[in-house]
Image: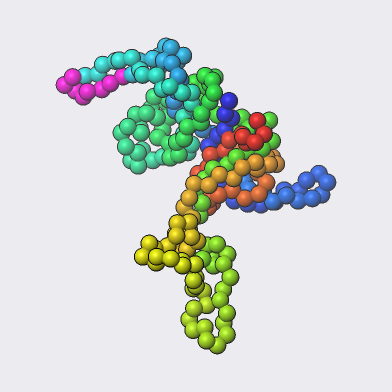
Amino acid sequence: MTIGILGKKLGMTQLFQPDGTWVPVTVLQAGPCKVLQVKAEQTSELPEEERVAKRNFGKKRGSTDRPRRSDGYYAVQLGFEDQRENSANKPESGHAKLSGSKPKAFVRELRYTSMPELKRGDEIGVAVLKDIKRVDITGTSKGHGFTGTIKRYGFARQATSHGNSKSHRRLGGIGRQYSTAKGVPKGKKMPGHQGVDRVTVQNLEVVKVDEERNLLYVRGAVPGHRQAFLVVKQSIKNL
């Protein structure tokens, strides 16, 4: 079973332990999240009211019902943080309305190995992680634009002595000793775009869970800028 929740990064601070040591932590707002949909391998496993899919053809033909197709896997679709109504399209608004919710700004699925106990319309908070000691956090890394190899990979700068004119931060030779017409070898560390990648930091320690305010404190840094959306799941290395 996958235990997880959606949230966003609020920032970093430090917490003092009972023995007087301090721990650098990242503060996350984890929840509340709305269950927008529950997916199952077989349609028969769904509640009676969800076994039928409603189809709306407009005013002329009206609406009809047909059996809902099976999803083929178990999952829970969660939505976090309300979105403005005029920022969401009609499919998003209609999908959220089925669970009695406003359109959500951040929607993700969490896979399950068996039929989850959650139902459409349920709301979950950070309390689902109260017994979890380690988590994996997935987010989008900060964007740094087009960067050189010194900033991107930590390469050393060239000499600043006489004879090296305006080449102090350039890459230098790339080791291509045959058929230069083939271009740069694949995988060669070169200047380019840095950041805005999907990054998962594994096995982060849960330092504190604040159920009243839906705050989660984890040791260390997590990907993304402040207010960036994140997916928090139980660590796969400690199942």
Q: Is 182 drawn above or below residue 8 in the view shown?
A: below
Residue 179 visible in rendering: yes
Q: Which residue is found at the position 46% from the left and 14% from the top?
A: 45
In the rendered image, residue 60 lying in the magenta stretch gets the answer: yes
Does residue 176 lie above or below 202 as drawn? below
| Range shown magenta | 54-61
- Report x, y in % for residue 95: 37, 28
Pick the residue in front: 236 or 96: 236
Is residue 72 shown above or below 7? Answer: above
Residue with the most extreme right position:
19
Instruction: Report x, y in % for residue 179.
Output: 39, 65
Q: Nearer the viewer, residue 40 or 49?
A: 40
Q: Which colour scheme is used?
A: rainbow
Q: Is residue 209 visible?
A: no
Residue 193 is one of the magenta-drawn residues: no
Residue furthest out toward the bottom: 162
Identified at 40% across, 35% down, the residue is 103
Residue ID at (57%, 67%): 155
Q: Which residue lies furthest to the front in this view?
A: 178
Q: In the rendered picture of this protein, how many numbered marks are placed on residues? A: 0
Residue 65: percent from the left, percent from the top?
29, 15
Magenta segment main secondary structure? loop
State the quadrant of the N terminus: top right
Residue appearing at x 46%, y 67% in the figure: 177
Residue 71 in which image quadrant: top left
Residue 2 as seen in the image, left or right of residue 132: left
Which residue is more in the foreground, 208 or 40?
40
| Quadrant housing the C terminus | top right
Q: Which of 222 and 201 is in front in this view?
A: 201
